[in-house]
Image: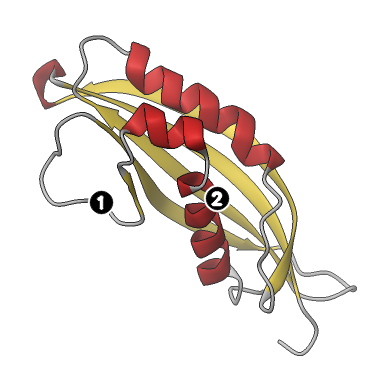
């Protein structure tokens, strides 16, 4: 199994998301690599949990990274949170992330999303789950 690319994948994903003008506009620039303390006002995006599964084969080390991007919003209704989520569902699978020197991104796929209300309905949350296939570089 290759977990060596996990940090590079997270860093490249964060850089990609913060460089996307529509994502930054929809979130007011509130894109976090770690959940902020409390519940910030407005709409924000958090890079969430990750699960990694071995996908090594005869050609070398590899892994499937299943990661979550969480959109949270205190806006009335789901429209704002779903606008951010819709943008993510389009751009993340098309991302050409550079993971060098720790690995190579083969592809990213949208897997599923779940929208729900939190804090007695005061906060909307949409969790989007993606799968990324990463190949490790030789010498791992």
Q: CA distance from mark 1 to mark 2?
A: 18 Å
Q: Which residue is mark 2?
A: 16
- Residue at point 45% right, 44% down? 68
Which residue appears farthest toward the bottom when viewing the image?
139
Does label 1 or label 2 sit earlier along the sequence? 2
In this rendered view, identify the residue nearer to me: 26 or 86.
26
- Residue at point 35% right, 22% down? 81
Q: Residues within 10 Å of mark 2 (few under 14, many from 20)?
A: some
Q: Position of residue 91 (x, y in %)?
A: 62, 35
User: Which SS class for mark 2?
Assistant: helix
- Residue at point 41% right, 37% down? 24
Q: Position of residue 45 (x, y in %)?
A: 35, 39
Q: Position of residue 60 (x, y in %)?
A: 83, 76
How many discs appear?
Answer: 2
Q: Position of residue 99 (x, y in %)?
A: 66, 67
> Which mark, by number, is residue 47?
none
Quadrant (top left, top right, bottom left, bottom right) of the N terminus: bottom right
């Amino acid at each position: 199994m290759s977990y060596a690319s996990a940090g590079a994948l997270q860093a490249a994903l964060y850089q990609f998301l913060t460089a996307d003008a529509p994502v930054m506009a929809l979130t007011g620039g509130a894109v976090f690599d770690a959940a902020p303390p409390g519940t910030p006002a407005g709409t924000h995006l958090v890079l969430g949990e990750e699960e990694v599964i071995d996908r090594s084969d005869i050609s070398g080390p590899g892994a499937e990274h299943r990661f979550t991007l969480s959109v949270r919003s205190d806006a009335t209704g789901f429209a704002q949170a779903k606008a951010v989520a819709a943008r993510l569902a389009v751009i993340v699978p098309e991302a050409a992330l550079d993971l060098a020197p720790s690995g190579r991104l083969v592809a990213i796929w949208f897997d599923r999303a779940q929208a729900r209300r939190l804090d007695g309905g005061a906060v909307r949350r949409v969790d989007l789950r993606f799968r990324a296939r990463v190949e490790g570089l030789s010498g791992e």
